[in-house]
Image (cartoon, rainbow, N blue to C red):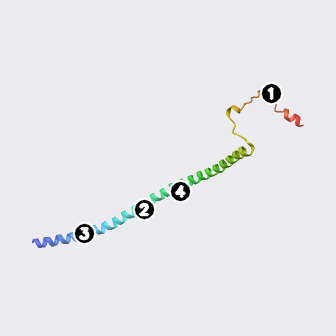
Amino acid sequence: MSWKWMKARWVRDSLIVGKVVMLVALPTALLLVHVWNQYRITDMGYQIAQVTGEHRHLMEENKKLAVEAQLQGRSDRVAEMAREQFGLVQTRPEQVITVELPAESVEPAQGLAIAH
């Protein structure tokens, strides 16, 4: 066997191996890219679902806070009007007197007897 013949055979075999590698590597690479894209799409879907749930929760909380702010605004206006128009002030704890009635002095049927 001559050196020239061995070199030619080696080049020819290398080309065949290169073709086979390309025929296997290209579809494999395309398949891997496809699988990776599907994984990313699925992951993004989960992230979108999570963010959508957070958005719904925040929207509900916003509605509750808006209602609370409206109610707070009304009570503040009522308190301000009571102070300005009627001269009312906030009660202090020492102004509050607790009255306790004995249990035997309260007769629930008494009010009905008078009404008849």
Of the residues under marks 3 and 1, which one precedes in the sequence?
A: 3
Q: Are marks 3 and 1 in contact (CB under 8 Å)?
A: no
Residue under numbered circle 1: 105
Q: Are marks 2 and 4 in contact (CB under 8 Å)?
A: no
Tag 1: Cα neighbours inside 10 Å, few (<14), some, or many (≥20)?
Answer: few
Position above or below: 85 against 40: above
Residue under numbered circle 2: 38
Of the residues under marks 4 and 1, which one precedes in the sequence?
A: 4
Residue 116 is labelled as none
Q: Residue at x 50, y 58 (%)?
A: 48
Q: Residue at x 51, y 55 (%)?
A: 51
Q: Is residue 34 left or right of residue 94?
A: left
Q: Amino acid at mark 2?
A: Gln
Instruction: Look at discs 1 and 2 and give the one toward the viewer.
Output: 1
Instruction: Look at discs 4 and 3 and give the one toward the viewer.
Output: 4
The N terminus - image quarter:
bottom left
The C terminus - image quarter:
top right
Q: Amino acid at mark 3?
A: Gly
Residue under numbered circle 3: 18
Q: CA distance from mark 4 to mark 1?
A: 61 Å
Instruction: Look at discs 3 and 1 and give the one toward the viewer.
Output: 1
Residue under numbered circle 4: 52
